[in-house]
Amino acid sequence: MEYFIQQTINGVTLGSVYGMIAIGYTMVYGIIGMINFSHGDVFMLGTFAALIMFLILTSLVAGMGVAAMLLVMMATAIVMSSLWSWVIERIAYRPLRGSFRLAPLITAIGMSIVLSNFIQVTQGPRNKPIPPMVTEVYAIAGVTISLKQILIVLITVVMMTAFWYIVTKTSLGRAQRATEQDRKMAALLGIDVDRTISITFVMGASLAGVAGTMYLMYYGVATFSDGFIPGVKAFTAAVLGGIGSLPGALLGGLLIGLIESLWSAYFSIAYKDVATFSILAIVLIFKPSGLLGRPEIEKV
Amino acid sequence: MTQATEEGRLSGDEVLRVEHMTMRFGGLIAINDLSFSARRGEITALIGPNGAGKTTVFNCVTGFYKPTMGRILMRRSGGAEFNLERMSDFEINRDARVSRTFQNIRLFTGLTVLENLLVAQHNALMKSSGFTVLGLLGWRPYKDAAKEAVEKARYWLEMINLVHRADDPAGDLPYGEQRRLEIARAMCTGPELLCLDEPAAGLNPRESLELNTLLRAIREKHDVSLLLIEHDMSVVMQISDHVVVLEYGAKISDGTPRHVQNDPKVIAAYLGVEDDEVEEVLEEIEEVAEEATHGHQGGQPTGDAR
Amino acid sequence: MTVISQPPRRPSDDRLKRALREALLAGLISLGMFVLYVGLQTTQDIRNQLVLNQRWGLLAILVALAVVGRFLIVYLLGPWFAARKAAKAARAVGAEAPPQNFLRRNVGWIALLALMIFPMAMLWLVGPQKSLKWVDNYGVQILIYVMLAWGLNIVVGLAGLLDLGYVAFYAVGAYSYALLSLYFGLSFWTLLPLAGILAAFWGIILGFPVLRLRGDYLAVVTLAFGEIIRLVLINWTDVTRGTFGVTGVPKASIFGIWSFDFNAANSFGKLFDPELRRPTLNSAYKIFLFYVILAMCAITAMVTIRLRNMPIGRAWEALREDEIACRSLGINTVTTKLTAFSIGAMFGGFAGAFFAARQGFISPESFTFHESAIILAVVVLGGMGSLFGIAVAAVVMIGGTEALRELHFLKTLFGPEFTPELYRMLIFGLAMVIVMVLKPRGLVSVRNPTAFLHERKAVSSAFTKEGHG
């Protein structure tokens, strides 16, 4: 039983990170119906921004508190991934808006290749380990829970609440939902569609930045190729939860995290990704709109 | 394959019979216990105010929606009967020979006009190409069949006066021609029942007249019965033999155009007036209808809620 | 790039101002983007700890490039593009002229002929040693991608089904050949068709449950399947030997008559001078492989062209345009999609078997999502559905990145530490983005109709609707 709870805790932590990345996929897909393949690599840029900031802080500012350090790193990661995502949207996706459906998908894949190789070229291909930042571990009734796990879950909850508020309660959220439903009509009603879409990209990217910082803090290592697997899994999470749905993305992320850690615990660690992808396929075959997505009625 | 059971047999002159059909979307009842039948060789029109559920009836008949309850029987000229509600959409076309057009035209816009008509002959051509295998090897009979298919397409292009546009992309045609092409494409599948969803919508008066001629020609030269949804009263009154009127998903009138035209319920439904006021407006209607039969009235494009 | 609607007093002056402003902005943005990643480099010191290197010079160069580049684009290229666009619009908007002259009509045959003499020409031009590089690294490599892209073209370009896991079928083909030939000693020519059939079979198995899905969901599931197959190859070590890969995959023979093994009794090398045997045999094998893959490509092209003119091919294209209309015309969309999926998979399987025979070694590394993405990129960049465009895209993208390996002169420019290979994929990715932004419908953006009544007119793909399935 302890083992199960332990694995559940690990799964929830991992799932929170996936969930935060998944938000970016789901929001962009919701608003322009495009799989933003470079989002995973934007997340990777976030981890690297946090990593570099960490090194700057440790070498320049002696004796800075961990909390302050984490905050600065997170802020840097948010700024960097948002900026990159904004630029990418501007040069690679916006010119293709309203064009052929596959065109932005191809530029997104191209951008994903560009980003990971850019980091490989500028930062080198090797793993970048950092010393552990948060080491406190609590043991309760045979189950250990580390402070960094608590932090990740806490930050996820805070970020999600903030996002949920923005999307459901503010005029920006309204503009986003309007753009999502009918871009032309939204434009006619005076919504700056381009700006709304840009902001959506930036919002998703800033969460990816947060997720990147959490990822770095949790695993203590970053690589240029880190964008792909978490990216694909987060996208899987978004689809699993029902693409376009914010709570769905979080739910999907948690599920993927749980499946992964429980499968590794009880079956085989080698096949954990096979399990994840198989479950994705099964869910899509039997419930194509995902768990929380609205079913799509085929218009004839 | 989905032959109707004995007790449901249609009488010889019936081509389609809808029995107690109900269609629900969530809590919304789009069609409520609707029954009607269409006779062979006739043009049956389905009319009604916006949102009456006409297109839903079509979608159920052609298999795009599965009705929540009820039966839809189709009898082919050979006597074979089909339970359409149990068949999937492509089988309804392939086996029961029911073909349809769409309210918002669905042509293959990137294919040429001719190719559109060839795609419609897919099943016949698949058979003659030995399901691609023999055709791939350059089998002679397939080549002949392919030529025949082009000739059939040419025939229909002549019927709709579009021979000169045969090699242009379908998306390049003006609206009215696209409508006609869609009808020709539906006819190329060799249907026995042709369902037209607002064929006259958006047509100008001249095109509307041409459409009437085309539909009459189709009925006379081919063994086809027609079921059509229409808003343009001139089309309905001029060419249909039988009219079914829907309101809020239920049938309110059924009979000849003349009968339906004078049915107070219909008038009330269309004008949204109380029953006791009907007598007053009846005369006005008479005049309008009179005009319509003389073909003075232009086509009224109307978006029907689906 | 907003249009400024002020009275056009001095347009060039305004343009200059605007260009300067945009350039400055670009400089600021690029400074922000690069300051951390380029200005600072994380490296491990002797104690294996991460330290930061400073590279402000490089950062300055990049920012300057962004400023100058943006300035040139806004000041010079922008007006030029606008003028060209206006000129294009002014020209008759009517249908494109059909390819009339001899050269354009027979481009396929001419290309085939040129490729037939290519290895010999190379042999004659640069000698047997250097020609290997041209025949193998360029010729065979590009042709493998051409074949893969043509196979995927059936699925994506014709039927409009977005398949992001195409490489799975490539892997099935490669492993089928490698394992069956190693374990059962079957020959290349028996296994080549078998590999195709197995891949098609897998295409059907994987395709059947998922082909009901709508476009992007289909893309995700195919991606998932691609990854599943790769992970199984990695983890099923008893059979596939995992990440170590399968080594010693037998070579192809000349239809079982001559072998390319040096020591075999029927070795092809025995036909040559004893001293020259080994290298010559090697070159001969590469040239033989070149012709094999050329023939395979030719067959793929022929089959695709024939299929396009058959009812099934037309149904694929109709499916890409409008699935609902297809169903209303009695077309069984599930089997139609399935045929596209499995025929595409079959060609992937053929290519895979060939790949295994050529490499002599395969590992799951060769079948990553990356590979699928490259093949898809070639299809889309070439212009979906156009065999010619796809072949050109393969030459440009694959040949181009291959050519980047050759840029040794850059070493003299940037110092000996500079390795152009590293930049290969970076440039590949950038090229993908740039080509797509400039030509969203690919290099060849017209569609050749499959039948005609009066005359064959190319159809602009502006009319082509997007795939929904």
Image (cartoon, grey):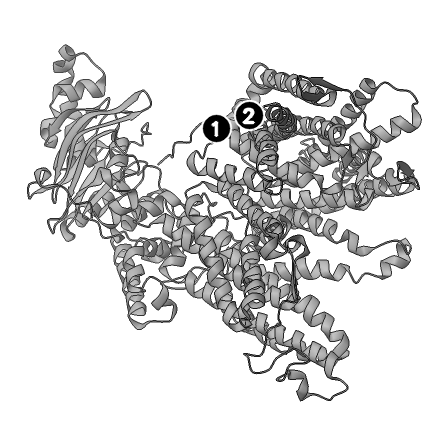
The picture quadrant where one finds residue C24 is: top right
Q: Amino acid at mark 1?
A: Leu
Q: Position of residue C211 (x, y in %)?
A: 43, 45
Q: Nearer the viewer, residue A194 or C154?
A: C154
Q: Using a 10 Å C-alpha cutoff, classify the residue at mark 1 as few (fewer than 14 neighbours), some (14 to 19) or many (20 or more).
A: many
Q: Amino acid at mark 2?
A: Leu
Q: Are marks 1 and 2 in contact (CB under 8 Å)?
A: yes
**SS at badge 2:** helix
Circle 2 residue: A251
A209 in relation to C191, above or below:
above
Q: Residue at x 55, y 45 (%)?
A: C223
The number of discs equals 2
Instruction: Give the numbered dot on residue B66.
Output: none
Chain ID at mark 2: A
Chain ID at mark 1: A
Q: Position of residue C145 (x, y in %)?
A: 61, 61
Label 1 vs 2, first from the N-terminus = 2
B291 in relation to C102, above or below:
above
Instruction: Give the numbered dot on residue A291.
Output: 1
A97 in relation to C363, above or below:
above
Whether labels 1 and 2 share one chain: yes
The C terminus of chain B is located in which quarter?
A: top left
